[in-house]
Image (cartoon, rainbow, N blue to C red):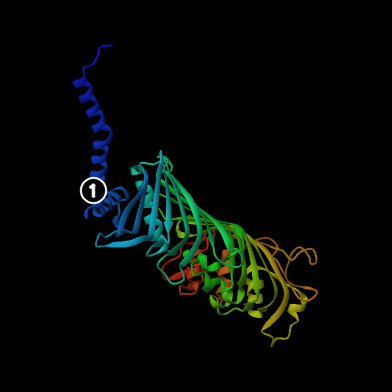
């Protein structure tokens, strides 16, 4: 050790004092000046916009503590496909971000999400996930006491509660998982959503799964994302189950559903779409599997459907019974055969049938009325069966002519393509049938 003279010790002490006090104070003062100057909020907007690929606007930015930032009045806008303007996709009153190592936690207050349509909203979410490679975090945790979701069409506005989830920024398969509660009777319904983008496949594949996990069934209006559920099923219908969507590259989405449809209004389901027939009652439909996707020589539609339908206390039109017997080979009981010719409908105590429509166009039907009636009975009066399932298989040919009766049951009969018969385009074309044209639907 070499002894230090007093002048050197004083100089060293001065340098240490500057390093420990003056310099940090200067750095803090510089940072404070930078974050409080009028242009800092604009700088943050530009940086966030660059990271997210969106247009970002903020009311203010605050830094409560180390690794923590609070954005107030945050609005996100995305450029439309034609590039003519920016459309708002999300806003929140407050967003509090907390950083820890490679993890980010985001607490949102009153977030509102918006898409001009379900398809466009899903595409916007896909773009954000695609940009996840630029996010400097391995995991992002999300929480919000409530969230408003607007998908652009009437009836597609939803309020979600107790939203919690995570985004895992896996380079090969980034995944978003969310749990939330939909308000309703009692505690409402707990649901889960999982969105994954598989970059390891070729072409790139996107999958979305939504399921109910706890609580009462949801109002069927939530299915309005896919079709006009209230117009088809009635205003009191409910749904409980799982919907899976999948898209490979830029192809159309494919879908699967497993679950239950409850309190289905048969009068709307049948009479509204097929006005020549009458069927009334409330039904429960259990779907074991229903697949929608691209089919050979056809546009997108039902690939196959398997399930069971049951209803108690209702009525059915004689015209519908006659069409089922004539076109699909359902078997009428002697009681129905001997009915008064002036009678236009008959009451039933129970309706129950299992069904399986295959991609070949074959339809398998069996009875599902329970042990009280014969195994093949599908419709029952007070004490006896009224209608039994076909022996063997039916076909989509017969179903089409049942729903839209034609004057003759010969091959090549065509059903006009109207607003009502449009539904036939979604049925699988039976083997040997020619593709449907834009003007007609093959009804043989």
Residue in the foreground of this view, choosing between 158 and 15: 15
Disc 1: which residue: 34
Q: Is residue 349 left or right of residue 430?
A: right
Tally of marks: 1
Residue in the foreground of this view, choosing between 243 and 195: 195
Q: Residue at x 28, y 11 (%)?
A: 1
Residue 93 visible in the shown view: yes
Q: Which residue is drawn at 72% across and 64% down?
A: 368
Residue 194 visible in the shown view: no
Question: Is 69 placed above or below 413 here?
Answer: above
Residue projecting furthest to the left = 7
Residue in the foreground of this view, choosing between 297 and 39: 39
Q: Is residue 383 left or right of residue 420?
A: right
Query: Horizontal and vertical percent for residue 63?
Result: 34, 49
Query: Horizontal and vertical percent for residue 11?
Result: 20, 25
Question: Is 440 placed above or below 44 here?
Answer: below
């Amino acid at each position: 050790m070499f002894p230090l003279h007093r002048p050197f010790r004083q100089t060293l002490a001065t340098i240490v004092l500057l390093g420990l006090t003056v310099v940090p104070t200067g750095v803090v003062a510089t940072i404070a000046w930078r974050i409080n100057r009028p242009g800092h909020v604009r700088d943050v907007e530009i940086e966030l916009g660059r990271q997210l690929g969106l247009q970002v606007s903020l009311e203010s930015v605050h830094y409560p503590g180390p690794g923590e930032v609070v954005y107030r009045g945050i609005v996100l806008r995305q450029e439309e496909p034609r590039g003519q303007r920016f459309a708002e996709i999300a806003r929140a009153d407050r967003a509090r971000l907390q950083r820890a190592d490679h993890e980010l936690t985001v607490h949102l207050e009153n977030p509102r999400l918006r898409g001009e349509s379900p398809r466009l909203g899903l595409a916007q979410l896909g773009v954000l996930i695609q940009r996840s490679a630029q996010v400097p975090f391995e995991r992002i945790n999300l929480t919000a006491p409530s969230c408003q979701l607007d998908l652009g069409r009437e009836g597609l506005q939803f309020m979600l509660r107790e939203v919690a989830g995570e985004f895992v920024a896996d380079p090969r398969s980034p995944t978003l998982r969310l749990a939330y509660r939909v308000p309703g009777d009692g505690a409402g319904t707990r649901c889960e959503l999982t969105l994954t983008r598989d970059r390891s496949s070729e072409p790139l594949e996107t999958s979305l799964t939504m399921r109910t996990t706890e609580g009462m069934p949801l109002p069927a209006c939530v299915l309005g994302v896919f079709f006009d559920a209230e117009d088809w099923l009635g205003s009191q219908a409910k749904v409980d189950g799982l919907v899976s969507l999948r898209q490979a590259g830029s192809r159309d989405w494919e879908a699967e559903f497993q679950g239950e449809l409850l309190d289905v209004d048969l009068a709307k389901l049948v009479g509204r779409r097929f006005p020549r027939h009458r069927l009334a009652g409330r039904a429960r439909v259990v779907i074991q599997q229903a697949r929608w996707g691209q089919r050979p020589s056809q546009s997108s539609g039902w690939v196959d459907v398997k399930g069971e339908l049951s209803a108690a206390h209702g009525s059915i039109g004689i015209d519908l019974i006659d069409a089922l017997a004539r076109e699909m080979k359902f078997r009428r009981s002697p009681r129905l055969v001997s009915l008064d010719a002036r009678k236009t409908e008959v009451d039933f105590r129970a309706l129950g049938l299992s069904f399986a429509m295959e991609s070949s166009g074959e339809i398998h039907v069996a009875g599902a009325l329970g042990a009280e009636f014969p195994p093949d009975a599908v419709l029952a009066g007070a004490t006896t069966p009224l209608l039994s399932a076909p022996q063997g298989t039916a076909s989509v040919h017969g179903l089409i002519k049942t729903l839209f009766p034609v004057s003759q049951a010969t091959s090549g009969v065509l059903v006009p393509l109207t607003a009502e018969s449009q539904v036939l385009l979604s049925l699988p074309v039976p083997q040997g049938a020619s593709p449907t044209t834009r003007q007609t639907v093959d009804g043989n």
